[in-house]
Image (tube, grey):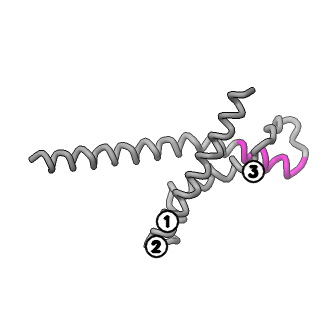
Amino acid sequence: QHTVNTLNILEKVFACLFIMDWLLNFFIADHKVIFMTSFFSMVDVLTVIPIWVTAGRECPVYDDIKSSGDSVLYLLFLLNTTRILRALRIRRKLTNIDDAVKRFIGEISC
């Protein structure tokens, strides 16, 4: 139980970091509408929102869905699977940073 609570706290901390990253990128973007409609921007938003809405709730069992509220909650739990896309985005960013560092070190050493 302690591990689950720790992981829930870490999830919220990372969600806050992603919200701050998204807001920073939004304010820096030259074309805000293009930024907001970009694939990765939507992935970030669709990944963070369900974390806050589903916090402290149990995922409803499919057969027990009786109201539209239960359906929305079920869909939000389903949207949590977009974390995989966010992880791929982080991996891509880290690869770009690694490439830039290698180029920079190569330029310095010449």
Label 3 SS? helix
Circles 2 and 1: CB atoms closer than 8 Å? yes
Indicate which label's residue lies in the foreground, 1 or 3: 3
Task: Give the side of residue 18 with respect to residue 104, left or right.
Answer: right
In this image, 55 relative to 95: left or right? right
* Near-viewer residue (79 or 17): 17
Number of marks present in the image shown: 3
Would you say residue 72 sits in the magenta stretch? yes
Instruction: Identify the magenta region.
Output: 67-77
Mark 1 = which residue?
Answer: 35
Residue 26 at x, y = what percent? 51, 66
Q: Residues within 10 Å of mark 1 (few under 14, many from 20)?
A: some
What element does badge 2 sit on?
loop
Q: Residue furthest left?
A: 110
Identify which amino acid the numbered label 3 is placed on: Val
Which circle, 3 or 2, is nearer the viewer? 3
As shown in the figure, which amino acid type bears the numbered disc 2?
Answer: His
Q: Is residue 2 above or below residue 108?
A: above
**Residue 81 on the magenta span:** no
Residue carrying label 2: 31
Residue at figure coordinates x 27%, y 49% from the top left: 100
Distance in Å between CA atoms under marks 1 and 3: 24 Å
Q: Quadrant of residue 84?
A: top right
Residue at coordinates 81% horizontally, 41% vertically from top-left?
Answer: 57
Q: Which residue position holds label 3?
A: 53
